[in-house]
Amino acid sequence: MAATLIDGKAVAAGLRLRIAEGVAGLAAAGHVPGLAVVLVGEDPASQVYVRSKARQTVEVGMRSIEHRLDAATPEAELLALVCRLNDDPQVDGILVQLPLPAHIDSARVIEAIDPAKDVDGFHPMNAGRLATGTGGLVPCTPLGSLMLLKTVRPDLAGLEAVVVGRSNIVGKPMAQLLIAESCTVTVAHSRTRDLPAVARRADILVAAVGRPQMVKADWVKPGAIVIDVGINRILAPELGEGKTRLVGDVDTEAAAAVAGAITPVPGGVGPMTIACLLANTLTAACARRGLRTPLA
Ligand code: GUN
């Protein structure tokens, strides 16, 4: 394996330490930042994420506020809860776990969140701020991915970046962040012609498609930095009957023979997402009090 493995677990742990220091500073001034997480329904993966978020929130010294609602909760009831959290001075960040049940319009719920408390960075106001370079809260997974990139290449200016995937949660904001870093950015997707050839142009290749091990070694330019955003559970008969394991969107082992640096799955981008959620909560808590974030 030639590539440097980018240790997202270690980078996330370092970030959480800095967050904890910032939280302690705010707490000493009389304010403990609060993060409200809303889970609708019993999706097992969402339950795991929400538990993990709550635990890490408390570990950095913040207040965790959890709201678990029945899967049949009417949209109006969820919107009313979001309104109450918007008005609650103890709440600095609001996260409504996605996906929501089919009868609820996710866009309407996201737009109901106060943009100043939108620690997911999904509100159109924050998306617009990112696109126009005017501040705002940035989606956690792209923010964490950028931090990992910078651990191996602090100055990204002039590099060719290819983002595979055009979701509002990862692909589009990732492209905006890379533009702000003065990269030349291509956003590729399921309708892109000759995707392997496009990917091979990349000095920075970000895979965010949600397809297990889709990016092969011959898609990777020698020496490229590969950021694998995918978290896919696949059957792993080699581990025993019915066993599963997590893989990314990249065929990591093969790609690592070509890449200069690569994020593993698990242990790459994944741990950064929650750490960045906590970072955004601290940033929001500071901004609501007219303070600069200590993380800048
Ligand atoms: N579901 C999976 N990832 C996320 C995330 O980052 N934020 C929210 N709100 N829901 C998710």
Image: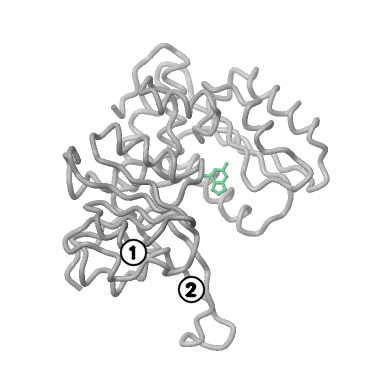
Using the image as rendered, state which of residue 218 and residue 263 is in the foreground: 218
Discs 2/1, front: 1
Using the image as rendered, state which of residue 3 and residue 165 is in the foreground: 165
User: By what rule are the colours in the image chosen?
Assistant: one colour
In the image, is 189 to the left or to the right of 71? left
Q: Look at the numbered discs 2 and 1 and tell me whether their residues touch, using CB distance below 8 Å.
A: no
Q: Position of residue 183 (x, y in %)?
A: 24, 39
Q: Which mark is residue 196?
A: 1
Q: Quadrant of ligand 1?
A: top right
Q: Amino acid at mark 1?
A: Pro
Rounded to the nearest angstrom, the CA distance separating label 2 from label 1 is: 26 Å
* Residue at 42%, 63% in the rendered image: 249
Using the image as rendered, state which of residue 94 and residue 124 is in the foreground: 124
* Residue at 53%, 34% in the rendered image: 122
Q: Which mark is residue 245?
A: 2
In the image, is 36 to the left or to the right of 16? right
* Residue at 41%, 43% in the rendered image: 275
* Element class at badge 2: strand
